[in-house]
Structures are given as structure tokens and as C-alpha cells.
Image: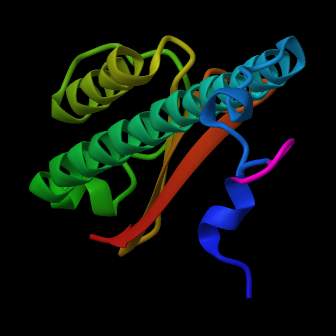
């Protein structure tokens, strides 16, 4: 067995471990470039993720607004149930607010105008009612929410 102090005796004897000064030689230029490249790709990925999140958030917000607008016209139709059941609220797909006049025309005018205020000027509405069942459809341009601009529609079927 060799004594621990025997490792340091004699000519040309070496320490069993390299000195701390020699072990820490520094970082090379290649390592720095690799680290910056990895960081840059990570930041680009985060930016793309944030852009996708904003786009999806916009689309979800518009869908919520369409749902609120649908509920609003359905409540007006339930308040004027006799006119709704005979089809006075029925309108084909229309994007222009009808001329205001009686209660039904005012309700439809306010509804289409509200769609424009909430979803933009290209928003349209359609109402088709049978005797008890009604389908209310809201159509809008979701170009900011989807790739390539896609028309979205939200049909809601209910009983009056």
C-alpha cells in the first residue's frame, strides 16, 4: 500500500488531481454561438405560441358575442311569442338591418345592428321558425381568428 504522502514525493511527482486553475479554462466562441442559437429558436417558438393564442382568443371572443346576440333575439321572440310562432320574426340571411317600424321590425333592426356592433359590418343573421321550433343563425367573418379568413356560423335551435 502506498502512503498518501508518497504521491507527492520525489522528482516529477504529480498531484492526483489537476489544479483548479487548469480545470476552468473558459467558454469558447462555439459554445456561446450554440447557446445563443438555442435561445433564439426558443424565443421564436414562444412568439409563435403567443400569436396563436391571441388568434384563438379573438375567435373565442367573437363566438361568445354571437351566443349573446342569439340569446338576445330569442328573449325578444319569447316576449312576443304570438308573433314569433306565426313566423313574423323569420328572415332570410340578411346583413342589412331591416327598416324599423312595429315591435317585430324594431327587434330585428336592433338585433342586426347589434351583430354589426359586436362582430363587425360583415355580420349577418338568419331566423327560421316553425310552429314551436326556431333556428337562429349568426354568420360572421373570422379572418383574424383563423388562417385564410373563414366565415363562421353559429346556429342555435330552440323551442319557443
Q: Nearer the viewer, residue 152 or 94?
A: 152
Q: Nearer the viewer, residue 31 or 50?
A: 31
Residue located farthest toward the left when viewing the structure as drawn: 79
Evaluate whether residue 68 shows in this view.
yes
Q: Nearer the viewer, residue 91 or 59?
A: 59
User: Number of marks in the image?
Assistant: 0
Can you say which quadrant of the picture contains the N terminus?
bottom right
Give residue 75's position: percent from left, percent from top. Answer: 17, 52
Drawn side of residue 63 relative to residue 149, left or right: left
> Looking at the picture, does residue 17 appear above or below residue 122?
below
Q: Which residues are magenta?
A: 9-13
Q: Is residue 67 magenta?
A: no
User: At 65% from the left edge and 76% from the top edge, which residue is drawn?
Assistant: 3
Evaluate whether residue 16 shows in this view.
no
Among the 4 quarters of the image, the one containing residue 106: top left
User: At 53% from the left edge and 56% from the top edge, which residue is drawn?
Assistant: 155
Q: Nearer the viewer, residue 85 or 97?
A: 97
Residue located farthest toward the bottom when viewing the structure as drawn: 1
Amino acid at each position: 500500500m502506498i502512503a498518501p504522502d508518497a504521491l507527492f514525493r520525489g522528482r516529477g511527482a504529480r498531484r492526483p488531481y489537476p489544479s483548479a486553475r487548469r480545470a476552468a479554462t473558459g467558454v469558447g466562441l462555439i459554445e456561446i454561438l450554440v447557446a445563443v442559437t438555442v435561445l433564439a429558436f426558443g424565443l421564436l417558438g414562444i412568439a409563435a405560441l403567443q400569436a396563436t393564442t391571441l388568434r384563438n382568443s379573438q375567435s373565442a371572443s367573437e363566438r361568445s358575442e354571437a351566443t349573446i346576440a342569439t340569446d338576445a333575439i330569442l328573449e325578444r321572440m319569447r316576449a312576443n311569442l304570438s308573433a314569433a310562432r306565426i313566423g313574423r320574426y323569420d328572415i332570410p340571411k340578411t346583413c342589412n338591418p331591416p327598416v324599423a317600424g312595429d315591435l317585430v321590425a324594431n327587434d330585428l333592426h336592433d338585433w342586426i345592428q347589434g351583430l354589426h356592433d359586436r362582430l363587425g359590418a360583415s355580420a349577418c343573421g338568419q331566423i327560421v321558425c316553425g310552429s314551436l321550433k326556431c333556428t337562429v343563425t349568426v354568420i360572421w367573418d373570422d379572418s383574424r381568428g383563423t388562417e385564410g379568413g373563414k366565415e363562421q356560423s353559429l346556429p342555435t335551435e330552440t323551442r319557443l
